[in-house]
Each structure stands twice: as structure tokens, then as C-alpha cells.
Image (spheres, grey):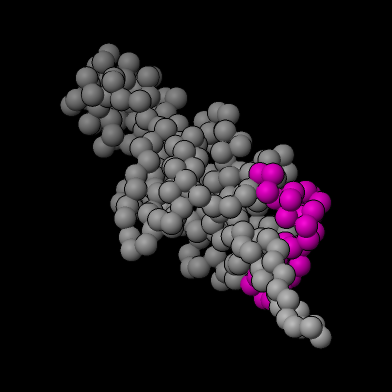
């Protein structure tokens, strides 16, 4: 991937009559790309490449990023395409159209590329193509997430620490839910049923679970490890705190 900031220089050199080899030596831009620009100068001049906040030292939408990171760690993946392009896909249940819209909005806020939707049985895959998705999501790697180490880079931790609510919201929207728990209590005069709301988070990766519970600790939200892959938030005040910024999926 070439540095887009050198594009104007390359176009000026080509227009001035420099050879493709010379322009390549001065800019590092591949000769195949330079050849296309020389053959179609009008298209090259009008093309605006998508920019990457990490590579091009630009401001990232930190709120959208923290939410999208939560979605990605839960139900997202990167797939390498031809020419080094990656497709980010977030699996969103068709039961929650609001979640599909929120995921598409977050994806579109981070890279200047088109956001698409691909229908699969029971879900919509919200996706976008870019060579730069691995820059923004360095947790990408071979195999399932629970089979490899998942940890945040320093710059990611800064964003998640600042926008912890959005991160937790993304994790719950992907691998969590808000439910009503029913408990039967046997009494002498008959059984009584009690209902109370709770949040459940399910992920087989211990690393991702730890990111979730560490975020809850920062928010002072009490949680319980139910089993090897399930975390529960059931105390009344803890549920009320999550309701402030998560709430039921819609």
C-alpha cells in the first residue's frame, strides 16, 4: 500500500514527462499503479482514495470505534480478498433491525468506504472493503478468536478506557442480551414465581470475557461468572446502570 500523500507529487511528475521508473523511485508507488495513472490521467486526478486514521495520522471517531470494536470482538471477522483488500463483516440478527443500522453507521464512520449488507439465513452481514481494516482491528488473525490470544493495543486501550460504555454496548449487542429471569420459590402455601431482569454475555474466549468484565469493573457494574463462557449481570442497581446506555436490543 503506497502513501496517499505522495499521490499529487506522482501525478505532477508524470505530467511533466518523468518515466514511470523514475516516479516509482521518488515516491515508492507501484509501477502498475503509475502505469494506470499515466494511461488514464483524468481518472487518477478525480479519484479520492479512502483514508486510514492509523496510517495517515487522522482523527478517529472514538465513540464509533469503541462500539464497533465491541461488535467485532463478538460477531465480527476480517476476510482477506484479492490484492490485499480485507472485508470486515459484522453478523447481525434480522430480529434486531436497529442493531443492523447501528452497526452500519459505526462501520461507515471509520473508513471512507461503502458499507454493504449481505443476507444470510436469519442474519444480515454488515460489511465494508478496505486494505486498512487490519490497521484498525489488529486482533485479526488466523483461526477462531478463542483459539488465539486477544489483547488490545495501547491506543485501543486508551479509546476503550475513555468510551467504556460504548465498548460494553457493542459487546452486549453482539454476544449479549437482556432477559427476564423467572425463579420459582417453593413455600408451604404453594409455589411463587419471581421475575427480574438480567444481562447475559456469552463468549468462549477467556480473553474477550476479561475485556468485558474489566470494562464492567471500570463502570462499577457488579457481575458474576456463571460458567466457563457466561457472565451475568443481575443485581438491580447493576442492571439499572447498564439500562442507562445499553438496554434491550431493537
Q: Is residue 44 above or below residue 203?
A: above
Task: Look at the image and say whether residue 147 sits in the magenta stretch.
Answer: no
Asked whether residue 159 appears in the rendered view, the answer is: yes
Please report the bounds of the magenta region as a residue range: 217-245
**Residue 21 placement, left or right of 141:** left
Image-quadrant location for residue 184: bottom right
**Residue 135 placement, left or right of 166:** left
Task: Residue 223: give x, y in percent of width and height.
Answer: 76, 62
Instruction: Depth check: give the residue in front, 34 or 205.
Output: 205
Question: Which residue is most to the front?
Answer: 189
Task: Look at the image and say whether residue 229 sits in the magenta stretch.
Answer: yes
Task: Residue 151: give x, y in percent of width and height.
Answer: 65, 57
Residue at 50 percent across and 59 percent down: it is 75
Residue at 18 percent across and 26 percent down: it is 39
Residue at 39 percent across and 44 percent down: it is 128
Instruction: Depth check: give the residue in front, 97 or 39.
Output: 97
Q: Is residue 16 above or below residue 147?
A: above
Task: Residue 110: give x, y in percent of width and height.
Answer: 50, 36
**Residue 19 placement, left or right of 139:** left
Asked whether residue 57 appears in the rendered view, the answer is: no
Number of on-image labels: 0
Q: Is residue 249 above or below residue 194?
A: above
**Residue 117 placement, left or right of 146:** left
Question: Which residue is most to the left?
Answer: 39
Quarter containing the N terminus: top left
Task: Residue 125: give x, y in percent of width and height.
Answer: 38, 54
Amino acid at each position: 500500500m503506497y502513501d496517499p500523500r505522495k499521490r499529487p507529487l506522482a501525478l505532477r511528475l508524470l505530467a511533466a514527462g518523468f518515466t514511470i521508473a523514475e516516479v516509482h523511485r521518488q515516491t515508492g508507488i507501484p509501477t502498475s499503479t503509475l502505469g494506470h495513472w499515466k494511461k488514464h490521467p483524468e481518472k487518477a486526478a478525480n479519484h479520492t482514495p479512502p483514508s486510514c486514521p492509523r496510517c495517515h495520522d487522522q482523527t478517529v471517531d472514538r465513540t464509533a470505534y469503541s462500539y464497533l470494536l465491541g461488535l467485532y470482538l463478538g460477531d465480527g471477522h476480517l476476510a482477506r480478498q484479492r490484492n490485499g483488500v480485507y472485508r470486515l463483516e459484522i453478523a447481525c440478527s434480522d430480529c434486531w433491525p436497529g442493531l443492523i443500522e447501528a452497526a452500519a453507521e459505526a462501520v461507515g464512520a471509520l473508513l471512507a468506504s461503502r458499507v454493504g449488507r449481505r443476507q444470510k439465513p436469519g442474519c444480515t452481514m454488515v460489511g465494508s472493503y478496505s486494505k486498512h481494516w487490519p490497521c484498525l482491528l489488529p486482533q485479526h488473525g488466523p483461526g477462531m478468536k478463542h483459539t488465539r490470544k486477544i489483547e488490545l493495543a495501547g491506543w485501543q486501550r486508551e479509546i476503550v478506557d475513555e468510551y467504556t460504555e460504548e465498548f460494553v454496548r457493542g459487546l452486549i449487542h453482539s454476544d449479549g442480551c437482556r432477559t427476564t429471569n423467572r425463579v420459582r420459590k417453593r413455600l408451604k402455601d404453594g409455589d411463587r414465581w419471581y421475575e427480574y431482569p438480567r444481562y447475559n454475555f456469552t463468549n468462549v474466549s477467556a480473553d474477550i470475557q476479561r475485556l468485558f468484565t474489566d470494562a464492567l469493573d471500570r463502570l462499577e457494574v457488579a457481575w458474576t461468572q456463571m460458567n466457563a463462557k457466561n457472565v451475568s449481570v443481575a443485581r438491580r442497581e447493576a442492571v439499572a446502570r447498564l439500562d442507562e446506555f445499553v438496554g434491550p436490543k431493537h
